[in-house]
Amino acid sequence: MTREEIKSAILNMFKEIFEIDNPGLDDNLREMYQFDSIDAIELIREIERLVGSELNLEEKDQAMGIRTINQIIMYVESLFEARSIRVN
Amino acid sequence: MRDLIVTLIIWLYFTLGFVVFFSPFYVLAYFFSKHREITFQHLNNYFCRIFFWIIRVLSPSHQWHIDEQVRHISSSVIVSNHLSYLDPLLFISLLKKQKTIVKSKFFNIPIFGNMLAWFGYVPSDAYGKHSQIMIKNMETMSDYLSSGGNLFIFPEGTRSKDGNINILNPGAFKIAKRCRAPIQVVWIANTDHLFRPGKFLFNTGISNHIVVKRIDTLYPDQYDQVSISELTLMIHALLGRKENESLINVNAGCNSNCHS
C-alpha cells in the first residue's frame, strides 16, 4: 500500500467507525475528539485487518500511545515494512 | 456516637474482615481455581453481600428497594447514575459475575492494584503501563459478556455532586456496540444519604429509601444504527427523565408528609 492509500484507509476508518470526519493530520485525537483507550483498541483491530495479520503485544503497546493521524500512518507503514510488504 | 460505632464496625469488616475471613479463599482461588477471574468475582460478590447485610442490620431506618430484575441481569453492559462510593459495591453485591471500570490510579496501589487486575476489572485509562490490562480485557470482553458476565459502568465518570446527571462518557456504549451486548439502564437513588460524599461517617439515624431499579433495556438491534453520540444522548435522556420523576416524587411526598 502507498502512503496515500494508507492515509485514505485511515481517514475512512475514522469517519465510519469513530464518527470523526476529516480530522487534521496532526490534531491530538485524544484532546480534540475524545478518542479514548477503547477507541485505540478498536483501532488496533482495524489496523490488524488492514495489514492482514495480528499485531504482537509490543506493537499493540506502541499503538496505545499514538495521538495523531500522521502517527497512525507512520505506524501502519512501519507494520507493513516489518512484514516485508513494500510501501511506495 | 451511633454513627461512629456503626462506621467503625462496617470498616472493620471491610478491612480486617477481608483479611481474616476472605483472604484465605482468595489465596486458594489464586493458586487452584481453573477460572480464577470468575472465582474472584464470586468471592467479591459474597464479600459485598455480607458488607450490605451488616449495613442493613446496623442501620434499620434505611429501607432498601432492590429491583429483582437487577439481580438477574446477565450478559449486559449496565449503566447507572452515580451518587456514592457505595454504588460500585452495591452492584458487586447484586451481580455474581461482574466487571467494572476502575480509575487507573487504583491500579498503581501495590497489591490492591494487582488484585483489581486479577478480578478482571478494567483501568479507566489504558495509556502507559495499564495498556496491556486494558487490551487483554477488551479482547476478551465479548466472550465474557456472552458467557453471562456483566460490565457495570457509571458513565458520568464520577459521583454527581448535586444529583443532576452529568455529561456521559461514551466508553460504555462503545463497548456495548462492539460486543453487541444489551445496555441495561439502572437508576440508583439515595445511597448518598446513607454514606454522604466527603463524609467519613455512615448516616445511620435518618429515615431513607434506597432504590436500585432497572429503568430500560436497549438491545443491539435497537441501537445498531444509532451513532455513539446519539446513543449517549438517548441514555442521558433516560437517566435525566428518571431524575426528574424522583424530584417530583420527593416534592409530592413532601407536600403531604414532610414537616418543616
Image (tube, rainbow, N blue to C red):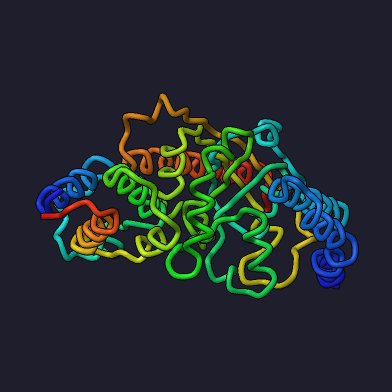
Q: How many numbered marks, from 0 up?
A: 0
Is residue B23 or residue B8 the one in the foreground?
Answer: B23
Indicate the quadrant containing the C terminus of chain B: top left, top right, bottom left or bottom right: bottom right
Instruction: Evaluate whether residue B34 shows in this view.
Output: yes
Whether residue A25 sits left or right of residue B174 in the image: it is left
Q: Residue at x 54, y 44 (%)?
A: B140
Q: Residue furthest front?
A: A84
Q: Position of residue B250 (x, y in %)?
A: 59, 45
Q: Nearer the viewer, residue A42 or B257?
A: A42
The picture quadrant where one finds residue B108 is bottom right
The part of the image, by quadrant, that contains residue B24 is bottom right
Q: For this rendering, which residue is in front, B70 or B145? A: B145
Answer left or right for B71 relative to B20. Answer: left
The x, y position of residue B200, in whole percent, is 71, 72
Residue occupying the point 50% across, 60% down: B132
Which picture quadrant has residue B197?
A: bottom right
Residue at horizontal 49 percent and vertical 46 percent from the top: B139
Tell me what residue is drawn at x 30 percent, y 48 percent.
Answer: A47
| Residue B60 appears in view | no
Along the line of sight, the residue nearer the viewer: A88 or B68: A88
Give the x, y percent position of residue B27. 82, 60
In which quadrant will I find the N terminus of chain B? bottom right
Give left or right: position of A55 versus B70.
Answer: left
Q: Residue furthest top?
A: B221
* Horizontal and vertical percent position of residue A88: 10, 55
